[in-house]
Structure formats: structure tokens, C-alpha cells
Amino acid sequence: MSSESTLSKKEKAKQNQKRWVLTVVILSFALSIVMSFLTSLFVESAGLFVALLALIMLVLLGIITDIIGTAVTSAEDQPFIAMASKRIAGAKQALRLIRMAEKVSSLLNDVVGDIVGIVSGSAGSVIALSLVKLGVPGTVASILIAAFTSAFMIGGKAYGKGFAIENSSKIVLQVGRLMALFEMKKRKKKRANRR
């Protein structure tokens, strides 16, 4: 009897893992298309300064999501259990994030991080073409943009990991509060639609 329930638990775990992998693949595909389309549309129609600003924003997005993903995996759930019992805003959501740390980290650190890396590379190539039009040799423009993007992204993530580990509880609580705010707005919208 217990071996059957253990087997079914293992099968359920495998099915959940397969579903998660499929979800990540579909989500990655959809996010890549949307982010690539919006970035290329925005960067190609903008000037060099705006394109550089867009590239910086993409890299910052990668760094911030990496910080949140690392903080979620580093945070302990005990303080949030106590906060949730005291009904502190965002504690319940923070606890939910910590209990799904593997999935949250995979989504933020890997999926978003990789997509941002790819999209920022395509944004960088558009900027390199703009620099070529200004008279900068093609090879030099490509190397400069690739070096800038890599250094900024790698340096930011390296600093961010240490910051995330040291401040994991604060970061996760802030994200939890943001989630609580969105959830509250969603509930209000549903109530308004029912009337």
C-alpha cells in the first residue's frame, strides 16, 4: 500500500517536472518573440542614444531578475511564517515564492536571464550598425558593444548575487509586497466586473 502511494508520488513528481519543463519552453519561446519584436521595433526606429538606453534597460532587467531569483533561493522561510501569522503585507506572497524557490529561480535566473542576453545581443547589433553609419569601423563597433554588454551584465550579476544573499529577506519581502499589491488590484477589478 505504502509502496503504491510512494510510486504514485514519484509519478506525480515526474509529471509535474515534465509540465514545468514544457511550461518553461513555451514561456521562453513566447517571451523571446515578444521581447525581440518590441526591442527591434523600438531600437530600429530610435536614435543611437535611445537604443543605448534600451540596451542598458535590458541588461538592468537581467541583473534585477537575477538578484530576485538568488534572493528567493537564499531566504529562509521561518521569518516569513511569523510575519504571515501577524498579517504583514507581502509575507504570505514571499512565503509562496520561497516554497517555489526552484521554479522561481529557474524562471528569473535562467529563462529571463538567457532571453535578456539574446535580445540585448540583437539590440547591440542594431547599435553597432548605427555606429558604423557614424564612421566607426564595423569590427570595432561590434567588439565595443559586445564587450560593454558582457562586462555590464557579468559585473552587475556578480555584484548582485552577493547583495541578494546578504539582503535576501528584505528583497523577497519587497517582491512579496509588490505581488500583494497586484493581487489586491486584481481582486478589486473582479469585484467591479461582477457589479
Image: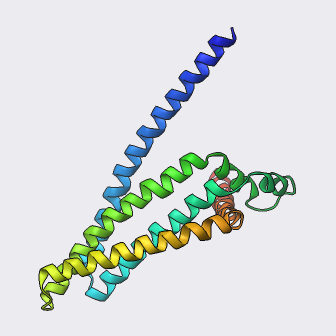
- Observer-nearest of 166 and 6: 166
Can I make out residue 51 in this image?
Answer: yes
Q: Position of residue 14 (x, y in %)?
A: 51, 27
Q: Quadrant of the N terminus?
A: top right
Q: Return the residue found at the far bottom.
A: 135
Q: Residue at x 45, y 74 (%)?
A: 155
Q: Position of residue 143 (x, y in %)?
A: 22, 78
Quick check: 140 above or below 171? below
Q: Position of residue 112 (x, y in %)?
A: 43, 58
Q: Quadrant of residue 54?
A: bottom left
Q: Return the residue found at the far right.
A: 86
Can I make out residue 195 in this image?
Answer: no
- Observer-nearest of 57 and 42: 57
Q: Quadrant of residue 49?
A: bottom left
- Observer-nearest of 185 and 131: 131
- Viewed as shown, does residue 151 lie left or right of 79? left
- Viewed as shown, does residue 88 lie left or right of 59? right
Q: Say how the picture is coloured.
A: rainbow
- Viewed as shown, does residue 47 lie left or right of 2? left
Q: Residue at x 73, y 60 (%)?
A: 90
- Viewed as shown, does residue 126 lie left or right of 101? left
Numbered circles on residues, count? 0
- Observer-nearest of 156 and 93: 156
Q: Residue at x 27, y 79 (%)?
A: 145
